[in-house]
Amino acid sequence: MSDRDREPQPPSDDAGAGGPEDPSRRRALAIGVSVLGGGLVVAPLVPALGFVGFPLRGAVTSAGGDFIAAGSRAQFGPTIPIKVDLYADRRDAWAVERQVKIGSCWVLERDGELKAFSTVCPHLGCAIEYDEEASAFRCPCHRSEFDLDGTPVEGPSPRGLDTLEVKQDAGLVAIRYQRFRQGVGEKVEA
Amino acid sequence: MAGIIDWLDERMGARALARRVANPDIPGGPRLQYVFGAVLVYLFLQEVVLGVLLALYYSPSTATAWASTAYIQDQVTAGWFLRGLHLHTSSAMVVLVVLHFVQVVWTGAYRRPRELIWWSGVLMGMIVLGFSMSGYLLPWDQNAYWGTQVRTGILGSLPGGEPLKTLAQGGGELGNLTVTRFYAIHVFLLPLATALLLAVHLIALRKHGVTPPARLDEAARAQTKPYWPYQRVLDVGAMAVTGAALIAMTVYTHGAQLYAPADPTTAFVARPEWNFLFLYQLVKFFEGPLQIVATAIIPGAVTAALFALPLLDRAPDRSPRRRIWVLAFVGAVMAGVVALTAIAIVDDAGNEKYQKAHEAALQDAARARALAAEGVPALAATVVWENDPDFKVRALFKEHCATCHTIEGKGGQEAPSFDGYSERRWLFDLVRDPTAKRFFGGTKEHNAMEPLPASDVSDEDLWATVEYLYSLRGDAKDIDDAKASRGKALWDDTLECNGCHELERKAEGAAPTLAGRGTLEWIQRVIADSSAPDLFADAAEMPKYKDKLSEDEIAALAQFIVEQGAPASTSEEDATP
Ligand code: FES
């Protein structure tokens, strides 16, 4: 919009101080129009930014957090890990899904203590499998391998398998499901 | 900045292009009545931006449309504002379409050679109503549902309209495909059509320029003025006034209403958007077979007349006096629309029943939205597995059996476990110690059978006996005959089991007969009624399921329990730990 005011204008009866051809007046108009036009864009833009950035303000999806019943203590032994699916209500934006599988873990006894390893690979989140022949946990994606204590033996995983909190009460086992940040050496909640 | 412009100018003549596009000459000089088109373009762009934003959160399906809209309205930052602004902007577009239309008709701007501008304009005006109608359904609330029900009903009532209705609804009734169709129309088809028509509209307008008032003479018309600065100041000023009014209105009304979710089973007094009230009122005037007059004939005739206007108007010039019939016709239509709208509003204002129903609807809406804050229960797609018969029978087992019986290590211990059920190993362990928790240890009053320790019967003898017992099922094909006959000898001569257990079918004894024991049919009978005299008789503790479950369910459960014994070992060697 500024190109015209630099060009010579044909004579016009409006020419002269105060008319539309007066450069200072044209500049004032240009500023006014820019301010109004800018306002038109900015007014909805501010709420729009909050709207788009809403997921940054807090978790949109959530599940677990509490201890979840995982069956009787008797079913878990020291040699073969048992896969346990954990069910809980899951919140996903507007929806809540009742008692859906929110995650799984491998449970076994190590040194007399019950351990639950999340099936989420600490590398990039694929599902860890148990390899019966090798008695080891394996990730099918980038071949990370872990021993029965969850310690990494091979592959790119930056840390061992993530343990989940286990609680026992009257022969029943409960496990707290959590997700952890992937690809980093430290186990921190995601 | 100037550098970039220079660069572009050198390569594509940016300055000259900008001048041609953005700064045309205006015959007769700038005027306030030229602002409507500019404001409409601005509003359209605002709708596009707001629409894209809303689409970040909206989910088009009957299960999620209302829930996601409620989420936008009540939870997402500024969601109520952007949604409200989207709705009010669409209303403003209707108003401006009407103003633009009146101005164009008054100046006779539809006349040759501006037919294309006119036709594209009329089409865009109709599209604005199309946006309103399709967007109306998307929240899938009561108002949306019932309002759309009426509209598609009207479509279906037209001659040959039934297939059209099915096509528009995506089926015989409003449902998922209606939402997806309306969504596709609203966010893809209509905006695309608008963009194309707008291009035609503006290109043709650039060619012919705006139409100055008819009263200006040749000389005044020849006095062209550039668009910049005054027309632009007027345009941007009008946009700013409109924009500010819309924001004020959105804040004042706290956005758009969202009623309770669509419920096809409850009545709801739906009212169309204000811009369709006139049609709604018109339909009320024509009853029965005459309805088509209001739904198709009158609107169709008016639309056809509007399209034909440039062809019908043969007046020698644009002066209003020479086009009096055109102005009278359009004036009459406008007056009719205004009058019908007013009647509809006044009718409802004085209609106590409607007021009450509307009040109740608002209360429902508030309640539903408060509940939605906890999340709207939904099913994950993985529930498709529940269609699997295996899932169904497991659910049945969990519900009716798992309190007492165990499978796969899970369940109660009040009754025998089904892991490896009735296989040789299971029988062996049972006979050795029926009082184990795995067997009858947890079952009340079920202690008549005594353990048979290794000191009484050797493992070898017991396996032979088990082989014999297993053969009594009658359905086992892998019987080791030599072993079984040794078992039979033990049974007949040494063991004392036959004091309680009979070996003929249906024979009554102090304990269940062992003929056919563990087969599908036997398990079925136990589930139905375990207190039959040839089964557990008086010792039966298990509830009778013959009245609680259907025959098919019992058969499925029995099959499931038989399968629990399936992968077990078939010979003594690999069965012995
Ligand atoms: S995700 Fe498991 S190794 Fe990469």
Image: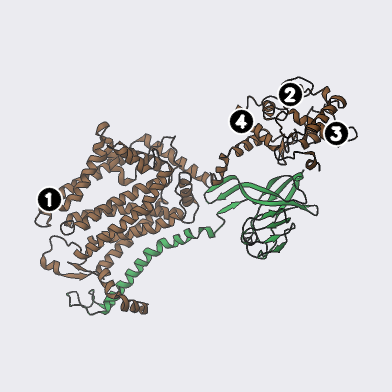
Chain colours: A green, B brown
Determine which residue is flagged by label 2.
Answer: B535
Determine which residue is flagged by label 3.
Answer: B461
- In the depicted view, which residue is nearer to us: A74 or B418? B418
- Secondary structure found at label 4: helix
Q: Which one is closest to the eye, mark 3 or mark 4? A: 3
B234 sits left or right of A79 in the view: left
Q: Quadrant of residue B18?
A: bottom left
Q: Quadrant of residue B452?
A: top right
Percent x, y of residue B205: 22, 62
N-term-proximal mark, 3 vs 1: 1
Determine which residue is flagged by label 4.
Answer: B553
Percent x, y of residue B332: 19, 45
N-term-proximal mark, 1 vs 2: 1
Amino acid type at mark 2:
Leu
Amino acid type at mark 4:
Glu
- Secondary structure found at label 2: loop
